[in-house]
Amino acid sequence: MPVADFDPKFMKVGVLTAALQELTPREKRDPDPDLAVEEWAAFAHEVGADYMQLSAALHPTEADVPAEALLDPVANTLDLREPFTKDRALRVQKALDANQIGLSDLGYFDDMLHEDPTIRKKKHDFMLRVFDAAGLLGVDAVCGFVGRNQGHSMEQNLTDFEESFVPLLKEAKNRGLVYRVEQCPMPGWTTGDNWHNNIAYAPGTWMALHRICEKNGVGDQFRIHYDPSHAILMGQDTRSIFQYLRDEGYAFLIAGFHVKGQVIDARGVSAWGYGGQTVERGDIVDGKPSPNAADHLNAWKKQVVLCEHELPGTARHDPLAYLQNRTVDWLDHQLAARELLELDVANTHLVVEHEYPPARVQDKDRLKPILQGSVAFTRKIDEAAACMYALQREVLASQEIPVQGRGREAFRS
């Protein structure tokens, strides 16, 4: 065998614009809807990113969920209340070019299987506007959720997915787009007891949904935007998930990454288990959902009582937590992606998603060094993993030199 050169492949590092909603105050961006994108392009450059995931959402005046009931700020950096025209796209592209920032994809994270037909149609119509904006911006993917019909069982939701979501994927196909699904289970979306409110929450359902997509000619449009924080939330670990996908012949499904961690609170797990708080949360009053929308925020205690999101680089290195699957082992995450998935690594996006509550300040000057540190950490971790992979799997392998040690192993208990 010829001796392999040392040629590490690095991923593309970006940031989700939802990290700072108030970069452009609403009184300025509402009358000038593309100003927020211009200012975010400049900010993305300042924090050291090469790309940004441009976040779209229904404007607070148009959304079905009041802002005070949301865990996160309304993420409509890309304002689509009015048609996104070629002139608007040109203005955005000029800002991107001036700041040497690319777009990884557009993001619209909402419940696309909402049980109310009127609300569902409104969300689908908005998603089509996101698709059209992606086309005008030359972006090849949109990232979002699938959601769940609360009036149906999980099994019935598979039928609902085929009847209602597959047509969206056909629209994506017509526009040359891929739809990348983030796997957050979204437990706080409902004041009821359902915990899995985005049916595409784990490899088992990813595969079931992809089979439906293949049957309908849109298999290539359905991919996963993997977020390890949600795996930790559900007691999973990245390496085992990737190994399982590889074993089942679905290593191709993951096509992008959110770089966001989760730090599990062992006391919270002791109190409630991984299902989170089930009673006395404060979202139910007199046996019914509270008439005060702000109380509905308490539905998220299904999640937040047992964990807290991590901005990469902000959590202490904890080998025991890694072994217990209670925080993300970032180096092994990046190694496992290269070792087990079918990726075009140099064209794969790592998108930093900032949801660490104490550091989620809405002040540019305070947030800037925080994001600079996290983006730099993400880049260096990926570079370290790339170098290890190239040295071990390519250079040493080409010379039949064994790799030392064992490393993390999938499915090990």
Image (tube, grey):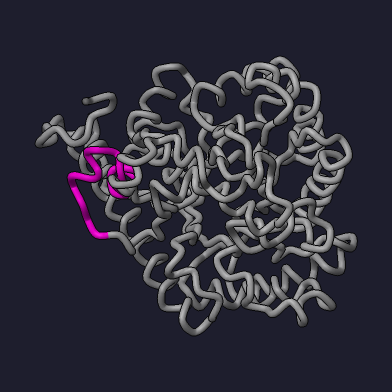
- Verify whether residue 276 appears in magenta: no
Q: Quadrant of the C terminus?
A: top left
Q: Nearer the viewer, residue 376 or 305?
A: 305
Q: Is residue 50 above or below residue 57?
A: below
Residue 212 drawn at (x, y percent): 68, 18
Q: Is residue 156 above or below residue 310?
A: above
Q: Is residue 213 visible?
A: no
Extreme-bottom residue of the structure: 365
Q: Nearer the viewer, residue 346 or 321?
A: 321
Q: How many marks?
A: 0
Residue 87 drawn at (x, y percent): 87, 68
Q: Quadrant of residue 19?
A: bottom right
Q: Is residue 88 above or below residue 246?
A: below
Q: Nearer the viewer, residue 158 or 223?
A: 158
- Verify whether residue 333 appears in magenta: yes
Q: Quadrant of residue 86?
A: bottom right
Residue 105 drawn at (x, y percent): 64, 52
Residue 75 drawn at (x, y percent): 67, 61
Q: Is residue 203 visible?
A: yes
Residue placed at 84% from the left, 42% from the top?
Answer: 119
Residue placed at 80% from the left, 41% from the top?
Answer: 175
Magenta segment boundaries in residue numbering: 316-335
Judged left or right of residue 140, residue 48 is left
